[in-house]
């Protein structure tokens, strides 16, 4: 054998550079389902089901193209880890080279390299190719970051807009006269709510996915969450349907309401494309082009398409660059010295706070929550409660169907928890119940009062927010973006501040009562 082409579970693109020069007479593709990929963090049933179903559908597509394939299914082999399974394949096939594109996790990259290195005596060479799915290479981002202690996403985003000629006019200036329409994209629904919402397309499980769902129950039946409502795209064809539906029916209002939340409405105007992008069923260029085409056709406003493009071309690419820039240090980051245990109800959704019950409940049912639910509800509470970053990281990586470590870790540890300090975010994203009340109707009927800071009926979001400000007053005072927090804190008398701290301590002592 000449090349053993390794394809990981988030590399499901027939256009992958891993297949460049592939010769069916000399080469072979290798894919494996192994328990460790669902147990190194306790992956929920929905997340595991999506990865396995998409992998098996991709394996069918490879076979249909006549590409020789070794595919190891759960329960058909005795290997726990990908490295062990690969080592066995190398010993059996003895290829001259292992070919793959860059992994999406530092852990896997290290494990594969070590497995190949152990077989160097047999002449096995590891050839890792740049992942051309991304619009900025690792080397390009490293050059961007060189010599900098702190990175700013907006600077990187504008450079990417210029490089790729996205939303620029004939003079090279930003369409609409400005680079960023973020201030126009913070609308809430108001008391009347979102009204009639366009339903996203449905992808009921086919026979192959039903087989996967049975395997998930058989092998990971004790894991949290449920895959009973499985409805995610698992093929490129389905992912294209999802993309076309979004730009036609929801992109128009995405910008204005991208930060809004509403009870029992998990999807609203969001694209639901991140899992397809992160599995490589969709290419970011085609996603951006589809959105921009809608704007050029006059079908959507500039603030919606710019806000969407910023998430793909800006934040998504920036997060990947930051991940490889900071690894493996990012795994251990804990700038605020936080060590509380993650409350058990993060895994069940059984909590009195309606905002947390909504965000966690839909996460466990669907594997999805949009960016504000992650940042300003579940992430915000973990930050102000003081949860150890590694525990929060493990939770986010476990529960979301779009969670691959290159995007999840910097978003969770760096942005939500401020655990990497100010290296690539400008402030801690901390807020009290007033923010939740402004951006949602979650507070309606909740047993807690968002304006109450201590004592009976006090909103845990509000209590923990003010306790957080008090604990980190010196740090917040020295940041122009957060100094107003400390000024507001000083309005409280000594007795009120003591009551806030006492209430916070009691909540940390018995989080199960929240």
Image: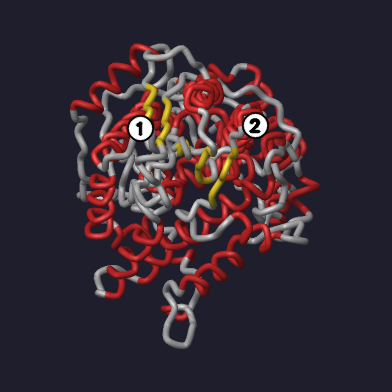
Left or right: residue 412 versus residue 34 is: right
231, 358: nearer the viewer: 231
Query: Which mark is nearer the camera, 2 or 1?
Result: 2
Vertical placement of 134 versus 118: above or below? below
65, 204: nearer the viewer: 65
At 51% from the left edge and 33% from the top edge, which residue is drawn? 95
At 25% from the left edge and 21% from the top edge, which residue is drawn? 211
Q: Position of residue 166 (x, y in %)?
A: 43, 72
In the figure, residue 369 lies in which quadrant? top left
In the figure, residue 248 lies in which quadrant? bottom left
Left or right: residue 313 versus residue 286 is: right
Q: Which residue is mark 1?
A: 69
* Gap in angstroms between the C-alphas marked 2 and 1: 23 Å
Is disc 1 placed on a helix, strand or loop? Answer: strand
Q: Position of residue 77 (x, y in %)?
A: 42, 14
Q: Which residue is mark 2?
A: 120
Vertical placement of 20 versus 393: above or below? below
Judge whether residue 10 can be spotted in this image: yes
Is disc 2 placed on a helix, strand or loop? Answer: helix
At 42% from the left edge and 86% from the top edge, which residue is drawn? 170
At 35% from the left edge and 32% from the top edge, which residue is drawn? 69
- Snapshot colouring: secondary structure
Left or right: residue 317 versus residue 233 is: right
């Amino acid at each position: 054998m000449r090349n053993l082409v390794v394809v990981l579970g988030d590399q499901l693109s027939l256009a992958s550079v891993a297949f460049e020069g592939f010769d069916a007479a000399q080469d072979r593709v290798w894919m494996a389902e192994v328990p460790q990929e669902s147990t190194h963090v306790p992956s929920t049933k929905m997340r595991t089901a999506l990865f396995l179903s998409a992998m098996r559908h991709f394996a069918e597509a490879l076979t249909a193209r006549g590409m020789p394939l070794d595919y190891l299914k759960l329960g058909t082999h005795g290997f726990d880890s990908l490295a062990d399974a690969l080592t066995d394949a190398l010993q059996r096939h003895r290829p001259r080279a292992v070919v793959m594109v860059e992994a999406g996790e530092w852990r896997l990259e290290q494990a594969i390299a070590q497995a190949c290195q152990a077989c160097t005596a047999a002449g096995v060479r590891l050839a890792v190719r740049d992942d051309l799915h991304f619009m900025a290479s690792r080397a390009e981002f490293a050059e961007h970051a060189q010599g900098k202690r702190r990175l700013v996403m907006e600077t990187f985003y504008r450079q990417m807009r210029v490089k790729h000629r996205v939303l620029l006019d004939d003079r090279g200036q930003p369409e609409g006269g400005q680079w960023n329409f973020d201030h126009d994209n913070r609308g809430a629904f108001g008391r009347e709510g979102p009204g009639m919402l366009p339903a996203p397309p449905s992808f009921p499980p086919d026979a192959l996915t039903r087989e996967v769902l049975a395997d998930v129950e058989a092998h990971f039946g004790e894991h949290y969450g449920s895959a009973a409502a499985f409805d995610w795209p698992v093929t490129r064809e389905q992912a294209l349907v999802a993309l076309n539906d979004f730009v036609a029916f929801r992109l128009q209002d995405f910008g204005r309401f991208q930060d809004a939340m509403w009870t029992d409405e998990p999807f609203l105007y969001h694209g639901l494309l991140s899992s397809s992008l992160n599995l490589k069923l969709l290419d970011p260029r085609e996603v951006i082009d589809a959105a921009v085409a809608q704007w050029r056709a006059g079908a959507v406003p500039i603030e919606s398409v710019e806000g969407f493009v910023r998430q793909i071309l800006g934040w998504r690419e920036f997060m990947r660059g930051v991940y490889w820039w900071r690894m493996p240090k990012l795994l251990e980051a804990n700038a605020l010295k936080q060590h509380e245990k993650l409350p058990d109800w993060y895994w069940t959704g059984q909590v009195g706070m309606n905002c947390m019950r909504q965000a966690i409940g839909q996460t466990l049912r669907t594997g999805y929550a949009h960016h504000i639910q992650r940042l300003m509800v579940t992430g915000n509470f973990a930050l102000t409660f003081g949860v150890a970053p590694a525990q929060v990281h493990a939770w986010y990586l476990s529960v979301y169907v779009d969670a691959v470590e290159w995007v999840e870790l910097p978003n969770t540890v760096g942005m939500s928890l401020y655990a990497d300090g100010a290296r690539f975010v400008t402030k801690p994203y901390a807020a009290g119940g007033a923010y939740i009340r402004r951006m949602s109707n979650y507070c309606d009927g909740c047993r807690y009062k968002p304006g109450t800071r201590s004592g009976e009926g006090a909103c845990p979001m509000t209590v923990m927010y003010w306790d957080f400000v008090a604990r980190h007053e010196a740090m917040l005072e020295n940041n122009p973006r957060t100094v107003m927090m400390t000024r507001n804190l000083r309005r409280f008398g000594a007795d009120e501040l003591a009551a806030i701290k006492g209430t916070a301590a009691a909540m940390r002592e018995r989080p199960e009562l929240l």
